[in-house]
Structure formats: structure tokens, C-alpha cells
Image (cartoon, helix red, strand yellow):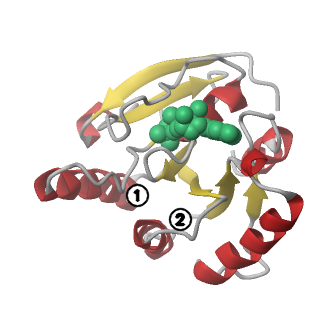
Amino acid sequence: MKIIKAELEKVAVDQRQYPEDGRPEIALAGRSNVGKSSLINTLVNRKSLARISSTPGKTRTINFYNINDAFYFVDLPGYGYAKVSKEEKAKWGKMIEDYLNNRQQLRLVVLLVDSRHNPTDDDKLMLQYIRSSNKKVIVVMTKTDKLTRNELNKNINMIKKELQLSSEDTLLQFSSLKKIGREELLNKIEQYI
Ligand code: GDP
């Protein structure tokens, strides 16, 4: 897939602000600092379309990026940031749940996990949310440039086990720094549009 247009079209805090043109949507989810903004920028070949967060957890909105006037990348708010109140966390949870449960045009959720670490409880909860809302999901391991080949292989197995992925599930590797996995992820996404 060639991306010739990528523009931030809507910034939403509730459902009334979502786009209304019915185009397919590919959502991206992950804990804050997982590398989601970097991944979006890498996919669309832009330096700073999505914000790279110096203060993690700052993005409390659902951002809709118009891609090629054909579909949307939907940047869901990063979760798992420690320094926010319970109230704030509940608000995020509800925002994400509302989106996942009610969005007909949502075709695929790309769930990002850090390739270096065990998936967090929030990662597992997120995957559960996605599955229980009957949406398709693929898991992407980010920042793989930080690992050796051996470490990466070990962590692939660990992540598969922790997230209880089956042979039918897709687990991809990605590095925004080294631009690894871009084509593969775009090809995968294209199958769902
Ligand atoms: P977000 O909070 O999930 O949107 O994460 P960001 O994209 O803002 O990235 C968080 C931090 O991780 C930043 O300092 C990035 O420079 C860094 N980062 C993101 N992707 C990669 C990657 O592929 N490799 C490396 N080494 N660092 C990355």
C-alpha cells in the first residue's frame, strides 16, 4: 500500500466527534510510551504527524487520521500511565470501551506491546476488551532494534505465551528507528480495509 495522503481529521473525546463518512478504521492501541506515535509516523512516512510524547500519557483523545481519503488510522489514548488519578483512568477506559464496542466501521485493532518486556496487566486487559467486543486484532512488538536476535526470539515466545496467542493470531515485529516491519504491517492492514 502506498500512502499518499495522511492528515489529522478529527480529535474526539466522545462519540459525537467521530467521523461520519463511514470509511473503514484501523485502530492502534497500546500503553503510553510503547512507541505508538513513532509507529504511526513511520507507517505514513511523516516525521511528526502523530505527536511523539515527551510527557507520556498526555494524549487523552481519540485521533482520526485520514489516510488516502480511503480509511482512518485511529490513535487510541495510551493506557497504563502511572501518574494519573483513578478517575482519569476510568475516563480513558470508558472512552476506549465506547469506541471498541460501538464502532461498526472498525475493521482491525493493532495492539502494540514493548518487545523488551512482559506484557503488562493493562496489555492483557486491552486484548481481552478487544476480543470480547469481537473485533479483529493483530499484535505488534515495538522497538525490536533494542534487542539482539536471541533476546527477540526469546521474547516472541514469552509474549505469545503471556497473551495466549494461537497459531492463527498474527504477531509482527516493528522498529520505527530502523524502519523494520513497515511493509509487512501495511500489507497486513491492507487485507482488512
Ligand atoms: P507513544 O507514547 O506510544 O506514542 O510512544 P512514542 O512514539 O512517543 O515513543 C516513546 C519513546 O520511545 C520515544 O522516546 C521514542 O523515541 C522511543 N521509540 C519509539 N519507537 C522506537 C523504536 O522503534 N526504537 C527505539 N529505539 N526507540 C523508539
Q: Position of residue 150 (x, y in %)?
A: 86, 66
Residue 2's image quarter?
top right
Compared to residue 87, the image places residue 134 above or below, namely below
Specify the quarter for ligand 1.
top right
Q: Is mark 1 within 8 Å of ligand 1?
A: no
Q: Position of residue 69 (x, y in %)?
A: 62, 22
- Mark 1: amino acid: Leu
Crowd tier of the residue under label 2, counting other residues whose Cα lies within 10 Å: few below 14, some 14–19, many 20 or above:
some
Task: Check if mark 1's residue and mark 2's residue have beta carbons within 8 Å.
Answer: yes
At 27% from the left and 58% from the top, the residue drawn is 93
Q: Which mark is residue 135?
A: 2
Seen from the viewer's position, the closer of residues 82 and 127 is 82
53 to the left or right of 61 = right
- Mark 2: amino acid: Lys
Residue 7's image quarter?
top right
Q: Which mark is residue 142?
A: none
